[in-house]
Image (cartoon, rainbow, N blue to C red):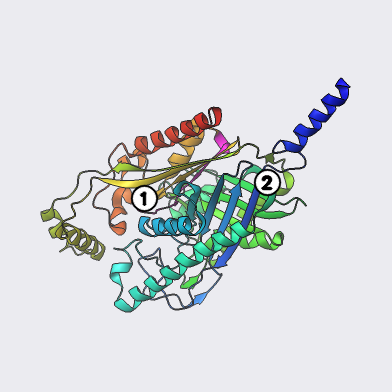
């Protein structure tokens, strides 16, 4: 009798415990929507362009992956083929997601691929693009941005509607075409690479999250890489190498939604570049790195819960200019300096003083017990990924840049001290009034550690 009672109790545990053979730990749903403009819209990323897009090399996409753990905790990762979105648009999308689906801010991560062959987005890089354009082009950008907003909200709803029991696994591959652009002259890269003499830090990890249904069919794959999407500078819409990588994976795995997030690649370029053939080549290499993880390595099961945090911290800027200095800048021969100065003067004249800080977004998810997914805003240099991986969990720590708000370059203390484009020169194109303060890296890294600690405490003491 005791043996029968024991067996019955054991069977009851198997049937009722989440993650048993009869009940997967996760539910997931994925969906995608084409966001390629159907009217002439100016392209983002390069100041040298003199006209709107005149064709299409590939479509542009917004994609959504919804994950739900065994306790019903839900999160959505959104990837978009855009150079970036600003805080205002990101916040508006999240408000709509809350109103439509009840999603809170910490449940949403919006990742931009940073392709330089997508449209200008309302609010982003205003001195570089928006303020340089006439009213007709500005109107086209505003109309497309409104449509994009609705498309993103709708695709998240489709992904929620596609929720089904799923198995999640993770792994990490390698791709080596990213090159530190601060340390290596573009024309020298082929010879330096052949001699194994490339200089500067890089991050060649390719993190992979695979989602399979109960029939073990791949339904979604999320992957990342730390490299600028700047292979191309044409007048045709394109997802650049990340777009080609996603196309390769979706063709190789029918009915799979392939999703790319950009890592900390602000100082990394795909080199050499400038041709469609190279963009396709890098896309194939990245897709092959992902497939090597999916097909030829033992991926780890994702077990445990989905835990999420999100905060906007006060990231300090350096010394702010006074009004007289801004007025002088408004008379500069540099038209982008003039555009920024006019923006800042209009703000001051509205009675809104320049802020010494910026509300910088930091989010951390633990996807199960192993994967730490860190989402940082802005164009983040590679030092952050390398440091966080060394201080946290190595290849199990995935660091996305260009997430939730792309407001400026985010230099490390080293890069800030060295100066140059990533160290402060690019701030004029984003419209911020000054370079970052020297402790910018410490403030961001401390916040990541705080959130990781908060999640760990939640797991121990739910």
The answer to whether 406 is drawn above or below residue 72 in the figure is below
Magenta stretch, residue numbers: 394-410
Q: Residue 228 shows which numbered tag? A: none
Quadrant location of residue 26? top right
Q: Which secondary structure lies at badge 1? A: strand
State left or right for residue 127 relative to residue 144: left
Q: Is residue 16 visible?
A: yes
The answer to whether 53 is drawn above or below residue 47 in the figure is below
> In this orientation, which residue lies closer to the viewer: 104 or 382?
104
Q: Position of residue 105 (x, y in %)?
A: 44, 49
> In this orientation, which residue lies closer to the viewer: 159 or 358?
159
Quadrant location of residue 446? top left
Question: Gap between marks 2 and 1, in whole Å?
Answer: 31 Å
Q: Position of residue 460 (x, y in %)?
A: 55, 27
Q: Residues within 10 Å of mark 1 (few under 14, many from 20)?
A: many
Q: Which secondary structure lies at badge 2? A: helix
> In this orientation, which residue lies closer to the viewer: 159 or 205?
159
């Amino acid at each position: 009798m005791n043996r029968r009672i024991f067996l019955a109790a054991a069977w009851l545990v198997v049937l009722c415990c989440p993650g048993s053979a009869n009940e997967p730990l996760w539910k997931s749903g994925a969906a995608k929507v084409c966001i390629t403009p159907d009217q002439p819209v100016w392209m983002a990323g390069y100041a040298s362009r003199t006209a709107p897009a005149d064709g299409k090399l590939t479509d542009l996409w917004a994609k959504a992956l919804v994950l739900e753990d065994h306790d019903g905790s839900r999160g959505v990762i959104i990837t978009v083929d855009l150079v970036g979105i600003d805080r205002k648009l990101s916040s508006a999308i999240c408000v709509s997601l809350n109103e439509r689906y009840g999603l809170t801010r910490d449940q949403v991560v919006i990742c931009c691929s940073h392709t330089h062959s997508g449209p200008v987005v309302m609010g982003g890089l205003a001195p570089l693009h928006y303020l340089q354009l006439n009213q007709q082009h500005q109107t086209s950008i505003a109309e497309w941005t409104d449509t994009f907003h609705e498309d993103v909200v709708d695709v998240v709803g489709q992904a929620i509607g596609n929720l089904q029991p799923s198995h999640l696994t993770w792994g990490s591959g390698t791709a080596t075409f990213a090159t530190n652009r601060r340390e290596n002259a573009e024309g020298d890269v082929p010879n330096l690479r052949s001699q194994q003499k490339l200089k500067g830090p890089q991050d060649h990890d390719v993190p992979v999250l695979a989602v399979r249904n109960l029939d073990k069919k791949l339904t979604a794959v999320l992957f990342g890489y730390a490299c600028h999407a700047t292979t191309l500078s044409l007048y045709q819409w394109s997802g650049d190498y990340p777009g080609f990588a996603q196309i390769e994976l979706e063709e190789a795995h029918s009915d799979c939604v392939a999703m790319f997030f950009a890592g900390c690649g602000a100082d990394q370029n795909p080199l050499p570049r400038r041709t469609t053939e190279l963009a396709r080549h890098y896309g194939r290499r990245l897709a092959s790195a992902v497939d090597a993880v999916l097909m030829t390595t033992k991926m780890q099961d994702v077990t445990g819960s989905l835990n999420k945090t999100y905060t906007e911290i006060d990231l300090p800027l350096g010394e702010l200019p006074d009004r007289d200095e801004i007025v002088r800048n408004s008379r500069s021969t540099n038209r982008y300096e003039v555009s920024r100065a006019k923006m800042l003067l209009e703000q001051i004249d509205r009675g809104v003083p320049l802020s010494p800080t910026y509300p910088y977004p930091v989010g951390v998810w633990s996807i199960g017990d192993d994967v730490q997914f860190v989402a940082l805003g802005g164009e983040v240099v590679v030092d952050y990924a390398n440091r966080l991986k060394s201080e946290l969990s190595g290849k199990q720590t995935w660091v996305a840049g260009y997430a939730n708000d792309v407001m400026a370059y985010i230099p490390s203390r080293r890069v800030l001290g060295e100066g140059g484009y990533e160290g402060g020169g690019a701030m004029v194109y984003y419209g911020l009034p000054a370079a970052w303060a020297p402790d910018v890296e410490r403030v961001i890294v401390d916040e990541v550690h705080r959130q990781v600690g908060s999640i760990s405490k939640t797991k121990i003491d739910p």
